[in-house]
Amino acid sequence: MLVNLLDFDLAGLTDFCKSLGEKGFRATQLFRWIHQRGASEFSQMTDLAKSLREKLPTVATITGLKVISQHESTDGTIKWLFDVGNGNAIESVYIPESDRATLCVSSQAGCAVACRFCSTGHQGFSRNLSTGEIIAQLWFAEHYLKQKLGRTDRIISNVVMMGMGEPLQNYNALVPALKTMLDDHGYGLSRRRVTVSTSGVVPMIDRLAQDCPVSLAVSLHAPNNDLRSHLVPINIKYPLQELLTSCNSYLKSAPRDFITIEYCMLDGVNDTDDHARQLIDLLVKQSSTRLSCKINLIPFNPFPASGLLCSSKERVASFAALLNQAGVITTVRKTRGDDIDAACGQLAGEVVDRTKIQSRLAKRATIPIQIASSTGASNAHELPPEEAYSQ
Ligand code: SAH
Ligand code: SF4
């Protein structure tokens, strides 16, 4: 079986080269050919010793993902659908802006967290992506765009792990991919410009702080445990108090002095003035959960199976105003690539649901409008949230 060199960060590639009896510096040469120059053939690597160039194809490959489709939006956003085998597909989105270019990368085929408002979550979980499949999204996009735009300088300046999947539930594959993004011999991205977005896998937030601290975004979506457990079922396992404690310790090693809080605005569900006040209480007033953060309000991208609607523009503006008045910097996320279904939460790909989440979600109660506050009694749940998070 040939080894795919996209599966290695530089340390891994060095070990691999040593196992072939080669000097460590050969790995750096190889790594630069692959990630900086986009090489996929060993014969291209003219500065490698001929003996190594001949040996490599007998033991290794550089194999990217098969592109199923590419859609370009009128605003310049490009969405790719990649085949990851066995009927599964994942998506990546390129978002150019005046001062940066961001690639939104997937980490899993499907997702087991099953958030109510997320179309990936509604598809169920199929499998983790390998390091090679995660980095191949950047490898492909960077080199494809270089060619398309006729540029030799770096194109993608930022990576957000906000595509399909929960990156911190695929930790072992994620970390070498992040290291490759950061490596000066790889993509040379700054830690501040690589963001892991998580629904709140607390132990893995703690490990990421040790292993590879990058910018962190936390998908909060609710200001109290009752509502959050409905919307983001992993909250049952790792409730708000624990999550915010872990965010606070993450800040000690993070490249930024704040954490981004993502909050998807759902009409009548989590968007009232009372919810904003609870959020202020949680993130500003209570000393046990206070957090240095910026809040990003995401207009909900509706899809029929969710049974949810996006809050009105006016509601989003009032909610943001309350938070800003309380001193929490709050912005509203611009949606990009709407015409090609590339906005947050619309990445659906195609996933073979091995967790049967779709049928379980269908049995779940609809979200009660106006859940009681954190201190009040919670609404009756027809199906205990635990059942929804039993993977
Ligand atoms: N699993 C990770 C990263 C992928 S989701 C996480 O949950 O953080 C990236 C972001 O898109 C998350 O903040 C998620 O809550 C948000 N999102 C999911 N579905 C959405 C939808 N339908 N509309 C708007 N945002 C959505
Ligand atoms: Fe998974 Fe994130 Fe979607 Fe939740 S929002 S189901 S964690 S991809």
Image (cartoon, rainbow, N blue to C red):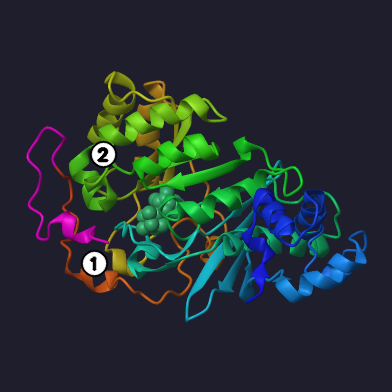
Classify the position of the C terminus by image quarter: bottom left
Query: Who's the residue at 26% across and 46% down the image?
Result: 235
Tally the numbered discs. 2
What residue do we see at 49% from left, 53% from top? 172
Q: Position of residue 109 (x, y in %)?
A: 46, 67
Tell me the quarter of the picture where residue 383 sits.
bottom left
Reply yes or no: does residue 208 show up in magenta. Answer: no
**Label 2: few (<14), some or many (≥20) within 10 Å?**
some
Q: Name the amino acid type tagged 1.
A: Leu
Q: Position of residue 319 (x, y in %)?
A: 35, 35
State left or right for residue 214 relative to residue 186: left
CB at disc 2 and ligand 1 closer than 8 Å: no
Q: Position of residue 317 (x, y in %)?
A: 40, 37
Magenta region includes residue 388: yes
**Observer-nearest of 112 and 97:** 112
- Describe residue 150's horizontal placement relative to residue 106 as left or right: right
Residue holding disc 1? 361
Looking at the rendered image, the quarter that the N terminus falls into is bottom right
Q: Residue at (12%, 32%) from the top-left corner?
A: 375
Q: Nearer the viewer, residue 90 or 380?
A: 90
Read off the residue under disc 2.
Answer: 272
Closer to the eye: label 1 or 2: 1
Mark 1 and mark 2 lie on one chain; the one further toward the N terminus is 2
Q: Look at the numbered disc 1 and give the secondary structure of its residue.
A: helix
User: Foreground residue, 84 or 73?
Assistant: 84
| Rendering coords of residue 194 (x, y %) | 59, 43
Q: Is residue 65 above or below residue 184?
A: below
Residue type highlighted by circle 2: Thr
Q: Is residue 149 visible?
A: yes
Figure check: 305 above or below 190? below
| Most distant residue in the front direction | 21
The span picked out in magenta is: 372-391
